Amino acid sequence: MLIEELTSKEFEELSKRIKTLIIPIGSIEAHGPHLPLATDLYTIYEVCKRLSKEVEVLVSPPIYYGLCRSTKHLSGTISISGEVLKTFILNLLSEFYRQGFRNFFILSGHAGKTHLAYLIDAAETFLEKVKDVKFFVADIYQLLKEVLVEMKISESDSHAGEWETSLIMYLKPELVKKEGFEDYPHFPKFRVVSEKVKYWSSGIWGNPCKGSPEKGKKMVKHLIEILKKEIAKIENESTYS
């Protein structure tokens, strides 16, 4: 169930028995000329919507913004700092904890490593203060790795390429344009550079031309099944102390 669609009374009644909350997080980020800026939000949020129809959990209103390093200088990318992201997540956790939730799934459609590190840090910081909670923190790429190998999608395909394009072709087909092309960044190894657009101007990391709605459907099914298992696991285990 989506929290944003509930009345106050419905929320009060549901939160008495449902202790698992999912917080979907995306980004507003360049995804080539063929995918929408909110690709990372749409993928994870649409999966969460479908998941909530199969498992009794509540889904928080999504967070559209994230920390985007490599694409920061591309048109349309709106990045927030890691500190802002962490502070916001901690504030949300505090409020949802006050409302009675104890199991938190922080799921990110944006797979930036630094972005994810701040989400994990937020969960660990909250755990230091509050002991009767449990966390599951992951990004969509981590959750898809197994099925991507099974589908023989290249490890070098990581952003606006085959798998991400396939997801949007299945979940939001009306938003996919035909201008996608194969491309990869060429950042100098171990270097930290300011002019990132010089090394990655397209926002594409892979081959979107190989994408298909059928592949997207298979990925969504995989994501829902793995998350159903993880929810059952976290709800049935004892709280760490």
Image: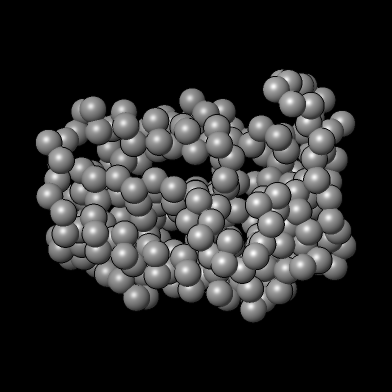
Name the foreground residue: 182 vs 13. 182
219 with respect to 137 (left or right): right
Name the foreground residue: 41 vs 166. 166
Image point 30% across, 49% down: which residue? 104
Q: Is residue 221 above or below residue 164?
A: below
Residue 151 in percent (x, y) is at 61, 68
Name the foreground residue: 154 vs 231. 154
Image point 84% across, 50% down: which residue? 183
Q: Is residue 131 above or below residue 146?
A: above
Name the foreground residue: 164 vs 33. 164
Residue 48 in percent (x, y) is at 44, 64
| Residue 159 seen in the current view | no
Number of marks in the rendered image: 0
Image point 23% across, 27% down: which residue? 128
Residue 130 in percent (x, y) is at 19, 33
Quadrant occupied by the C terminus: top left
| Residue 237 seen in the current view | yes
128 with respect to 171 (left or right): left
